[in-house]
Amino acid sequence: MPMRKKILFVINTMGRAGAETALLELLKHLDSPEYDISLYVIMGQGEMIGKLPPCVKLLNPGFNPHSVLSRQGKWGLMKTVCRAFFRNGGQMNKIRSIGKSFSSMRRRGKVQTEKLLWRMLSEGSRRFEEQFDLAVAWLEGASAYYVAEHVKAARKCAFIHIDYESAGYTREMDQNCWDSFEKIFMVSREVKEHFLAVYPEYADKAEIFHNLVDQEGIRRQSMVRGGFSDGREGVFSGMRGVYDGMGDASNGGEGVSNGIGNASDGYEGKRLLTVGRLTYQKAYDIAIDAMKILKDRGCKARWYVLGEGDQRKALEKKIAALHLEEDFVLLGAVENPYPYYVQADIYVHATRFEGKSIAIQEAQTLGCAVIASDCNGNREQIEDGVDGILCQLTPEGIAESIETLLQNEELRNKLGKAAERKNMAQEQELQKLLALLT
């Protein structure tokens, strides 16, 4: 009987985000007697850990299942950082690496606190004597540094999920880590182009690996009870059919956070939806200004956001200043977002940059009319005027695109049906990874 191939995946956290969702889908496809799959999470925490397939062995001896944004999660994060600073020694080297990263970021005009710590966290993570056949760094930053420098494996590969230039990574931070990888997989063509703009010498290693998307599973989950609970029930457009008893948001994970969601509201207007973390990248500050324009023009619409992040307080302050508390609604992170997609009239993804958005793929799978900003990543997923609309990332540009679709149901249906026809079940992608085991 042949020996099982030992594969290690390393990721920074297991929070509720696109890269983590993509990893869980890939791990499900690797559930086979041929493979012995292990996972190591650099930060040792994240609420998505409960979705880890049974076939995967978690190497973290203790795991914090709380979001890094929760009170328990933040406390756990602080303890992890402190432990990493002292574990494995080399405190002076760790301080110097933080200093180098800080200097590099300051020259570029933006200091990103979490990235300052990635190399220190890599240096202070647990070490394993086990030899793997393949080690996979699933994310940039700490997981890439850790696999490159501290994992024993016959072969190594890495995945890039973001616009590398816009995300703020630099050569000074990376310290030649990419030399250690046989393959560097990119989730889209534009991600590849932007990575090679920083590292042209790795062109021979770079290859596109599209996210695996379980379209049938998404459609099944969209049909369960849940979603919006502030009034409207019944029939929804496109492929989305008839829903009975809308109004139960009890499956909402961290749930509704601001009081919107009372069925007595009786809301009858149009619904806009965005799914994504509350971060600078996602440009919610611009979206709020767009919602103000729509309200001033008399559009009867509500914009809902599913997700959490470090920008929540700032966004709530801006929403209140513009008197949009009932118009731009931060619902928090939810366990199952898919009923919300099918109950929305328009899905909006107006971000500053992307790698390849899982949320857009989910919206397309569920036949949503999609509006996305014309930026890196988004433009590769949307054919403007065919299966969605690309807009300028300005309040006026977003508002005008939304108003156009709100007033044209026929166009909404046309775009949604074209999006739904997209085939994203790229099973052949898996073979690119497994080829490294031969």
Image (cartoon, grey):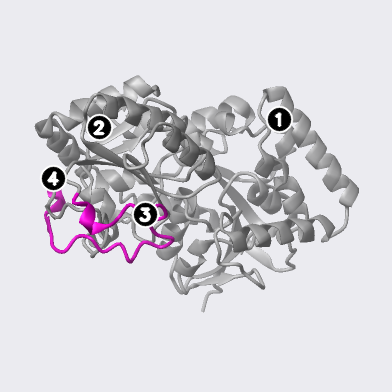
Mark 2 or 3, which is nearer the eye? 3
The residue lying at 37 percent from left, 23 percent from top is 395
Q: How far is mark 1 from mark 3, CA to CA?
A: 39 Å
In the image, taking residue 350 as reference, residue 115 lies left or right, namely: right
Identified by mark 2, the residue type is Gly
Q: Position of residue 147 (x, y in %)?
A: 67, 53
Mark closer to the chain start, 1 or 2: 1
Q: Which mark is residue 105?
A: 1
Q: How far is mark 4 from mark 1, CA to CA?
A: 46 Å
Mark closer to the chain start, 2 or 3: 3
In the image, taking residue 351 as reference, residue 12 lies left or right, namely: right
Looking at the magenta stretch, what is its main secondary structure? Answer: loop
> Toward the viewer: 3 or 120?
120
Q: Position of residue 100 (x, y in %)?
A: 80, 34
Residue identified by numbered label 4? 238
The residue lying at 88 percent from left, 52 percent from top is 90
The residue lying at 30 percent from left, 51 percent from top is 425
Residue 293 appears in view = yes
Q: Which residues are magenta?
A: 239-266
